Image: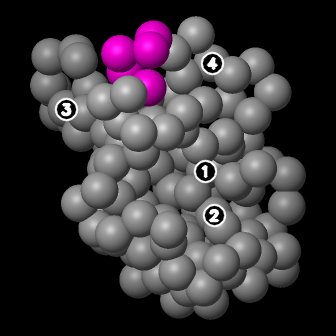
Amino acid sequence: MISLKKLLKEGSYGSSILPLGKVNLITGKCPIFNIYDTYDGTAEIWKTSSYRMPSKSQPPVTHKIVFTSDKKPDKKKGERETFYHDQTRREFGTWELVDFARVKDMKKLAKYGKVLNGYTYK
């Protein structure tokens, strides 16, 4: 449950998202469907920091991809959002929007990783 102090600080309760599993940004494949065949919206890249010690195999910053049916994100680059699981309300964390592209141009976002954990807004 989100604290009242956090709610007042962030100004919203956050956004509900549903995990899609690992998404290949080149082929569009994910465990549920193919992104290119399913979405005609926007792919957003969000940055989240890790609290573990950095290593070569586990970098301190990870990127996630969130899909929306909108033509552009609601947030501007550099803005932060707290995300929650759509069904369990488990908090995923507060992430920063770093980039976005139309789904048809999603390959341009592979510079953040060829395969990323994917989510969709609910």
Asked if residue 58 lies in the magenta stretch, the reply is: no
Q: Pointers 1 and 2 in contact (CB under 8 A)?
A: yes
Between marks 1 and 2 in the image, the one whose residue lies nearer the viewer: 2
Amino acid tagged 1: Gly
Residue 68 lies in quadrant:
bottom right
Percent across and percent down for residue 119 are 64, 49
Check residue 118 in the rendering and tell me which mark sits there, or answer none: 1
Asked if residue 4 lies in the magenta stretch, the reply is: yes
Answer yes or no: is residue 22 visible.
no
- Distance between mark 4 and mark 1 Cα atoms: 16 Å
Query: Mark 3 or mark 1: which comes first in sequence?
Result: 3
Amino acid tagged 2: Phe
The region drawn magenta spans 3-7
Left or right of 27, for residue 93: left
Query: Mark 4 or mark 3: which comes first in sequence?
Result: 3
Left or right of 80, for residue 122: right
Residue where numbered disc 4 is placed = 90
| Mark 3 closeness class: few <14, some 14–19, many ≥20 residues within 10 Å | some
